[in-house]
Amino acid sequence: MATAAESTLHGYSADKEQLLKRLARIEGQVRGIARMIDEDRYCIDILTQLGAVDTALEAVAIKVLEEHVQHCVAGALASGDPKDAGEKSRELLEAVQRFAKTR
């Protein structure tokens, strides 16, 4: 039987450090873009960097979404609890819809 700590782990927990490092790099990229704007850099150069940040954030989102499906949703479906399975399935569909709207 899972302990309380194990049952509160999320799908991304195994990759938490990797995700945090990637987000810190993205944060640095955003600060760099702010400097570019402050320094009146060329518009296309700024847009290029904004695109890179957007792509990097999408990669993080895809990783978290994958882990949600493989851990949270799969666990709920395997549990045999129809209420939990329905809730996790609904959450997944809502997350995909939100993600699709940002494209």
Image: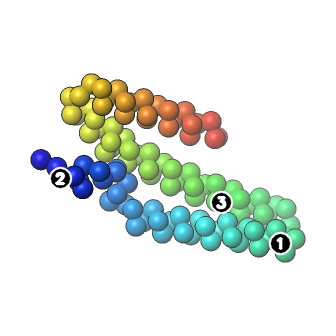
Question: In the rendered image of this protein, does residue 42 appear above or below residue 76?
Answer: below
- Secondary element type, mark 1: helix
Residue shown at 65% from the left, 68% from the top: 29
Residue shown at 37% from the left, 60% from the top: 15
**Crowd around label 3: few <14 · some 14–19 · many ≥20 (10 Å):** some
Distance Cα–Cα, label 3 vs label 2: 40 Å
**The image quarter in which residue 48 lies:** bottom right
**The image quarter in which residue 75 lies:** top left
Chain-order first, disc 2 or disc 1 = 2
Residue shown at 51% from the left, 65% from the top: 22
Question: In the rendered image of this protein, does residue 35 appear above or below residue 45?
Answer: below
Q: Which residue is mark 3?
A: 52
- The image position of residue 9, as x and y in percent, is 30, 53
Distance Cα–Cα, label 2 vs label 1: 51 Å
Between 64 and 86, the one lying in front of the other is 86
Residue shown at 12% from the left, 47% from the top: 1
What is the quadrant of the C terminus in the image?
A: top right
Amino acid, disc 2: Thr
Amino acid, disc 1: Asp
Distance Cα–Cα, label 1 vs label 3: 19 Å
**Crowd around label 1: few <14 · some 14–19 · many ≥20 (10 Å):** few
Chain-order first, disc 3 or disc 2 = 2
Between 92 and 8, the one lying in front of the other is 8
Q: Which residue is mark 2?
A: 3
Do the numbered discs 2 and 1 sit on residues whose CB atoms are within 8 Å? no
| Circle nearer the viewer, 1 or 3 | 1
- The image position of residue 62, as x and y in percent, is 48, 48
